[in-house]
Image (cartoon, helix red, strand yellow):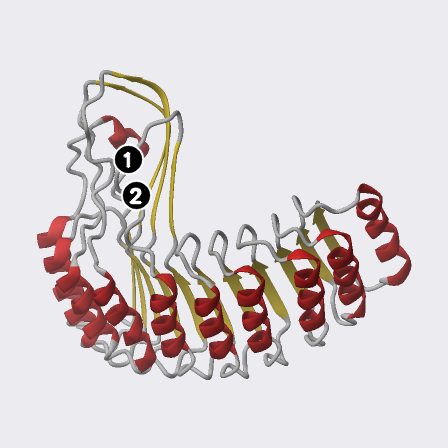
Amino acid sequence: MREIQQFSLSKIRLEQNDLKNAKSTKYLGQEKVAELSDLIKEQTQLRDLNLIMNYNNMEDTGAIKLGQSLSNLKDLQNLNLQLRQILVQRNLVFKQKQIILRGNQIGNSGAVGLAEGFNELKNLQKLNFNIVQKSFITFKILRQYRPFNYLDKNEIQQEQYFILLQSLSKMTRLTDVKIVLQYELQIQNHLQFNQLNKREIKSEGCKFLCQALQKCNLLQFLNVDLVFNGIDQIGAAYIGQMLTQLHQLKNLELNLFFNPIAKQGMEHLLVGLSECKDLEYLSLNLSNTGEKGEEGGIILAKYLNLLGKLKTLSLLISSSFIRDKGYEALQGAFLNLKCLNKLYLGLDNNQINQNKKSNILQRFKRKSTKLIKFDLYI
């Protein structure tokens, strides 16, 4: 039989209707994941692998088998692996129920098993890896509830998580990477939990991730989503250092929403970003990352001015309090970017004078003739 070169599996285990049944069994489970892994392992000439395996309760056994199958795919070039656990449900009605919503329940040995598989993917050129833990729950009515396990999470401790991140350093031929490691929990209507986010990667984890990715110096497209990970100015400095090594980067998307990097961390990041001379597309989310002040706005403008080839800019800096002088400096930077033709701005909650806000549209109409798309939220 001719060997398969492309394989795609999209198995969305947990449908909305399943949320009504706390003991739903519509998942692959570790045995089926192991069988699937054995099938993949045989396809030694596989070039493209797309595995969307959210909510499948694979546990460590399944994750280890999956890692073993990956280690056999020496010629793999494109990998899309999603092991995230997302619960989106609103207006639930609970009456004396114990709710158990299963994820993949990958633990320490499972993470190490996946890392061992990643270590062998030396010919990989494109990677999309998603292991997000994210939950949105809105309670409409809550009566006489008993304690419940709202989400069976991936119980990966930091040390093993870092081993998994380090394994990316072996993929030195990568040109296109998307990494999603965000964590977010939103609970409404005054319900409290004793344990929420205990698996933020923080600056130490950011260090392992950045040191791995900076070895992938062929990267042209990089998308890193690190929402709610407790990364401070030290972690931002690691990101900046990584960017100084990625000289071929043309497209960068970096989401640091709700990480306390503050003004100094932002400057560390921007120093590295300014080394990406060929950057044409930049999406930067620095909203709710700490107060930057007027000086922060001026610093941001200074480094944006150095990205002379930039064609598309999406900049979100809500709640940074850059105020009027910071805002004016940014306006000047945008107008100095001669190649810029698409601009998306999110500047709300920055204590900017209302008159100055209204003037920005007129200034761009008069001075910028190349903008073909302009979205502004202030």
Q: Residue at x 79, y 72 (%)?
A: 338
As drawn, 170 above or below 99: below
**Image spot of residue 240 (x, y percent):** 51, 74
Query: Mark 1 touching mark 2, by CB under 8 A?
Result: yes
Image point 82% across, 52% down: which residue? 360
Task: Name the residue: 43% across, 80% down.
Answer: 214
Residue type, numbered disc 2: Leu
Farthest right residue in view: 366
The residue lying toward the viewer, choosing from 324 and 170, is 324
Whole-percent x, y for residue 19 in the image: 26, 30
Callout 1: few (<14), some (14-19), or many (20+) C-alpha neighbours within 10 Å? few
Is 206 rendered above or below residue 309? above
Relative to residue 24, is residue 378 drawn left or right?
Answer: right
Q: Residue 8: x percent and y percent? A: 30, 60
Q: Secondary structure at mark 1?
A: loop
Few, some or many residues within 10 Å of mark 2 (<14, 14–19, 20+): few
Numbered circle sitting on residue 196:
2
In front here: 233 or 148?
A: 233
Taking 327 as reference, is 290 left or right? left
Q: Which residue is mark 1?
A: 193
Residue 363 visible (yes or no): yes
Q: CA distance from mark 1 to mark 2?
A: 7 Å
Q: Residue at x 34, y 61 (%)?
A: 201
The image quadrant where one finds the N terminus is bottom left
Residue 125 appears in the figure? no
